[in-house]
Image: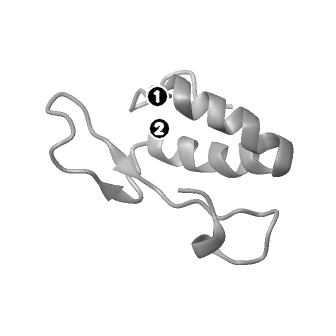
Amino acid sequence: MLNDNPLVQIDLSPEYKQNLRSLSKRYRNIRSDTQEVLEQIQAGNFIGDRLAGVGENYVVIKVRVKNSNIQKGKSGGYL
């Protein structure tokens, strides 16, 4: 569960939520895999690559997450 007093506010797009819902039918652990990354980002640990030129008032980062349902490492994971 996300902390009550986060250092960073995370806004998930409706497209992300829809994709997560459809992928969760195929990959049962996708929610727990992505939850760990969201907690790290919310704690202020910016992992991944920042996308430059996307927004001035906010930070957009791209993170690759390991898919624990398949054994291919991050290269076979979620983007």
Residue depicted at 54% across the width and 23% down the height: 14
| Residue 71 visible in image | yes
Relative image position of residue 66 (x, y in whole percent): 65, 64
Q: Are marks 2 and 1 in contact (CB under 8 Å)?
A: yes
Q: Quadrant of the N terminus?
A: top right
Q: Position of residue 52 (x, y in %)?
A: 18, 50
Dot 2 or dot 1: first in sequence order is: 1
Q: Is residue 2 visible?
A: no
Side of 51 relative to 8 (left or right): left
Q: Residue at x 82, y 63 (%)?
A: 69
User: Which residue is disc 1 drawn over?
Assistant: 6
**Which residue occupies 73% across, 33% down?**
21
**Viewer-closest of 76 and 38:** 76
Question: How many numbered tags mark residues here?
Answer: 2
- Give the residue drawn at x 46%, y 45%: 41
Q: Is residue 1 left or right of residue 45?
A: right
Q: Which mark is residue 19?
A: none
Does 63 sit left or right of 36 as displayed?
A: left
Give the label on residue 42, or none.
Answer: 2
3D distance between C-alphas at marks 2 and 1: 6 Å
Q: Residues within 10 Å of mark 2 (few under 14, many from 20)?
A: some
Element on which disc 2 rests = helix
